[in-house]
Image: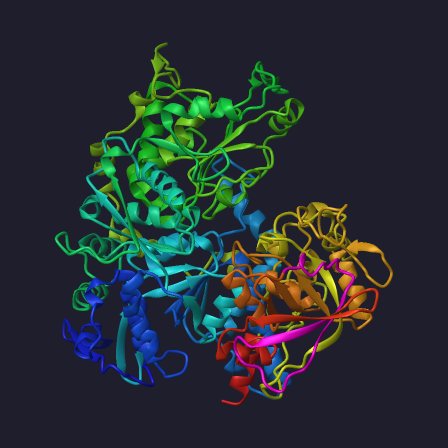
Amino acid sequence: MAAKKNSFDSRRTLNVAGSNYTFYSLKALAKAGLDGVERLPLTLKILLENLLRHEDGSTVTAADIRAILGWLGQKSSEHEIAFRPTRVLMQDFTGVPAVVDLAAMRDAMVAAGGDPQKINPQIPVDLIIDHSVMVDRYADPAAFAYNVKKEMARNHERYAFLRWGQLAFNNFRVVPPGTGICHQVNLEYLGRTVWVDEKGGDKIACPDTLVGTDSHTTMINGLAILGWGVGGIEAEAAMLGQPVSMLIPEVVGFRLKGALREGVTATDLVLTVTKMLRKFGVVGKFVEFFGNGLAQMSLADRATIANMSPEFGATCAWFPIDQVTLDYLALTGRSADNVALVEAYAKEQGLWRLDDAAEADYSAVLELDLDSVVPSLAGPKRPQEHVPLTDLCVATDKAIMADEPAEGVPVQGSDYHLKPGDVVIAAITSCTNTSNPAVMIAAGLVARKALARGLQRKPWVKTSLAPGSKVVTAYYEQTGLQADLDALGFNLVGYGCTTCIGNSGPLDAPIAAAIKLGKLSVCSVLSGNRNFEGRIHPQTKLSWLASPPLVVAYALAGTTRIDLSTQPLGTGRDGQPVYLKDIWPTNAEIAALTAQVSAAMFRDKYADLFSGDAAWQHLPVPLGKTYDWQPLSTYVQQPTFFAAPDKIKSGLDGFSGARILALLGDSITTDHISPAGSIAADSPAGRYLQENGIAPADFNSYGSRRGNHEVMLRGTFANIRLRNEMVPKLEGGFTRHLASGDELSIFDAAMRYRDEQTPLVIVAGKEYGSGSSRDWAAKGTLLLGVRAVLAESFERIHRSNLVGMGILPLQFSAGMTRQSLKLDGSEIIDLPAAAKLAPGQKMTLTVTRKDGSKQQVETLCRIDTVNEVAYYNSGGILNYVLYTMLHD
């Protein structure tokens, strides 16, 4: 971590409790003539320190450091910097392909005559298996054991592969299934706020930073740790010591004042904040919270807000270091040395929050009085659709179709009808809320008080409890609340994401049949973070995000067509109506039980975090530093895009006779490109699986099969909503094979072109590759044989991913489009070779039309930096790393 060059003489020593730590002083910049550090938002101070520490005159220069201070002029910047995170966090869906790539790189290293053990993460990497457990069994004391056993049976190939990786790689740890959710584990155990890296006898202290292969990595921002979600290619590059390129962001300040009212939860607050920030517009920006309201806000409340950053669109949602931070670190079992270092370092570097501190210079400032927050939900289809509790009945009525039977549909084998607006799933789920003892204890108290009054959940509601760590179980058992929740059917179903990511499992057959028969708009109510249509369960058209205690309340009510502020939940055993206010706990009651949460619980539950149960420990794991690929596996296969180059080229090979694989419009997102969701039986991926003996019932999802490139390349550009202008009458992943005129799936056409040795290009409009940063949007494009993408503009991260896979991003000259050129997809495209490739150079394509006429088309090469040139000329960033390690 020590920099090769230090233009500003910023290296200093900090003594804490008798130990000396080397650090890179922000105060030293003023002495070096750089003014304004004290006015920077704290998140930019963290980026500034990162640049200071890694200044090498190449990837990080003195000009980059000055650019951070230059940001103060306009409160924005187009300057690109190289950010090097301290560590990487992964979940299993996105982590498996990253480990597959590392394993394949080891094979490539052996093939090139090198040492495979050189291929290791260069920074710490933690992978937590949390995305695969499903709610197959519920409302049953045996639900947890059954669901974990089922999870292992479904995913044993993937898990055996990860177990091998755990043993084979240095700097790589795997948290086994049935343990916790990655973001809650990160918050409660992995994160340190201030990191210490021991190198060359020095203890180098710096802000704890990370990137993660999940969008809700931002939850760690609540612990004053700067981190956010990235795609797999960026994460792999960071793992292997490469920087993450980014623009210096705008930073929106969010002032909090006052305190929450009695009975209002952190969930109510975060849904309010989500609505505010989504309306304001913070996509691609940092949000930094400040103000005296933070003094009254627990760290768990801060983390709940930070977790929802993707829902309001920000890159991150960061909270500063203060006494609340220190108290949480101590509560969760961090060492006294860590806590002392965090305080001393933060105060020395100007990262400590003070009530009377001068306000930083922000790009913009919003304000919220916490006293104005009211009990709320969000839905029915987007997390920013904020609905006060009192308005939910009206909001549900608006969402129900007019022709739905008001009297409902009889449920076979029961004495009740299922009606529009009924709740069929009530799930306490997601690290967003299960990391917060206050709202979890509130849920348990609602259950306890409801039972005391004689209430029970409605029989049509599928209930589940899926905490993000075993600590929740510890304090539920300590307080006796687990028994109360069990009595209402909220038995433990697993430690994982479950319902929040759509792993809600099947509804009971009679319930599913009634929904289908009546075409009913039924509901899910969950303590999660996303509620897009079809995400939670295919049969729940409406999904509402709510606090854990409200999840319990709606399980009791059984419907969302009720105003819980005025209408009773049900009738008690005394024959009297029971209202929500009758069973809602007071803040004092919640605080009394929250006080029983102890550091001993955290130390105990995290003592054997990486060990796993007997099933994990006894997985058949091949030994060896290279992986023994199983040719019959449909989950994990050796990818084909690695080959260490003999040398890093300086020029451009070019291509001739290229055909257009797809002619696309504006705003083609990575959701259009990258495989996601279920696998259709009649799709190329579905046919492949059936040819390999997999029945459609056992397809699992694209997400679970991300370690098999054969599945993923068949699903690239297979989105059912894709519009290819070459086949205007078709919707979905189709194209025309130009030589024959046949209309085929994009995969089948690409394979025919491959057999004909024909290179391919994609042509598109504005904002190509917007949306989530998905590595398979670039990997799949490469495997289809695409050499270049020509678009009017690119989303920044996807452009970087294309370069990272050795695909050439070309941008039309200003004013030029596929329409102005009257392209119809029948053209042949040539790009001449060039002796030298430089960032941002102009490139001229020759376009040959059906009539034989030729046209020269000027484009801008969107390989933007010298490092990217090296990546591209190596066939991608991972091949570049291979070459570098071979010649190190």
Q: Position of residue 862 (x, y in %)?
A: 55, 70
Percent of width and height locating residue 186:
37, 57
* Image location of residue 585, percent across then percent down: 27, 29
Magenta span: predominant SS is: loop
Q: Is residue 187 above or below residue 680?
A: below
Q: Is residue 62 above or below residue 801?
A: below
- Residue at position x 70%, y 57% from top? 663
Magenta span: 817-846
**Residue 818 covered by magenta stretch:** yes
Query: Which is more toward the observer, 417 or 39?
Result: 39
Can you say whether 465 is above or below 648 in the image? above
Q: How many marks?
A: 0
Q: Position of residue 565 (x, y in %)?
A: 34, 21
Query: Can residue 336 be seen from the camera position used here?
Result: no
Residue 452: which quarter of the image?
A: top left
Q: Residue furthest right?
A: 740
Q: Nearer the viewer, residue 352 or 569?
A: 352
Residue 341 in magenta stretch: no
According to the image, what is the colour scheme of the structure? rainbow
Q: Nearer the viewer, residue 93 or 618?
A: 93
The correct choice, above or below, for 725 with respect to 659 in the image is: above
Considering the image in quadrants, where does the N terminus appear?
bottom left
Quadrant of the image occupied by residue 763: bottom right
Determine the residue located farthest toward the left in the rendered image.
356
Whether residue 40 is visible: yes
Left or right: where does residue 656 sit relative to residue 536?
A: right
Tell me which residue sits at (58%, 82%) in the image. 837
